[in-house]
Image (cartoon, grey):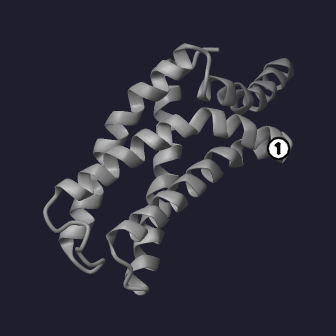
Amino acid sequence: MNTSPNKTALSATLHCLTGCAIGEVLGMVISSALLWPAIPSIALSVGLAFLFGYAFSAIPLLRARLSVRKAFTLVLAADTISIAVMEIVDNGFILIVPGAIHAGLDTSLFWISMLFSLVAAFIAAFPVNKYLIAKGMGHAVVHEYHHDHSQHQEHEHHHHQ
């Protein structure tokens, strides 16, 4: 397999981050609409970030015809550390930026701090994913399933030429 650990880690981190970002924004939207204070807002956002983070990583596995149980077992193993790192960095960042946690969704402070926190989370999670992949854990396991599928098609393609 010629996929570099960097590329694998990149795709793993981006999958996680996409899920996390959607979960967090959704959490912020819901908690803002309900006028919740900071702590329950963060709790909801983190919960949804985990949920969507796992979901985004599970989709390719389910496409590769893994059972839901096996897919989620792999994803829980692969993504828990990564999502946890992201959420700690992300929410830590939002808590450090003055007023960010109370900035409304219609303020540029909210979106700018969100963007920076996601970049910081990505930077923090990337080496974590890379390390896990190098050790054959986490997304290395998940990735075998991602590539099994595409390699079969490549082999068939070569035979026909």
Viewed as shown, does residue 123 lie left or right of 29? Answer: left
Q: Picture quarter containing residue 97?
A: bottom left
> In which quadrant of the rendered image does the N terminus lie?
top right
Farthest left residue in view: 98
Q: What residue type is labelled 1?
A: Arg
Residue 88 in percent (x, y) is at 37, 45
> Residue 47 location in percent, x, y?
53, 59
Q: Is residue 44 visible?
A: yes
Quarter of the rendering occupied by the C terminus? top right
Above or below, comparing residue 122 to residue 31 in the picture: above
Q: Which residue carries the number 1 mark?
A: 69
Q: Who is closer to the viewer here, 100 or 71?
A: 100
141 or 6: nearer the viewer: 141
**Residue at disc 1, secondary structure:** helix
Q: Which residue lies at the image location 47% right of the left edge and 70% below the top edge?
A: 26
111 horizontally vs 46: left or right:
left
Residue under the image location 76 percent in, 26 percent down: 148
Residue 91 percent coordinates (x, y): 33, 54
The residue lying at 32 percent from left, 70 percent from top is 38
Nearest the eye: 103 or 41: 41
Q: Residue at x 40, y 31 (%)?
A: 126
Tell me, yes or no, if residue 116 can be seen here. Answer: no
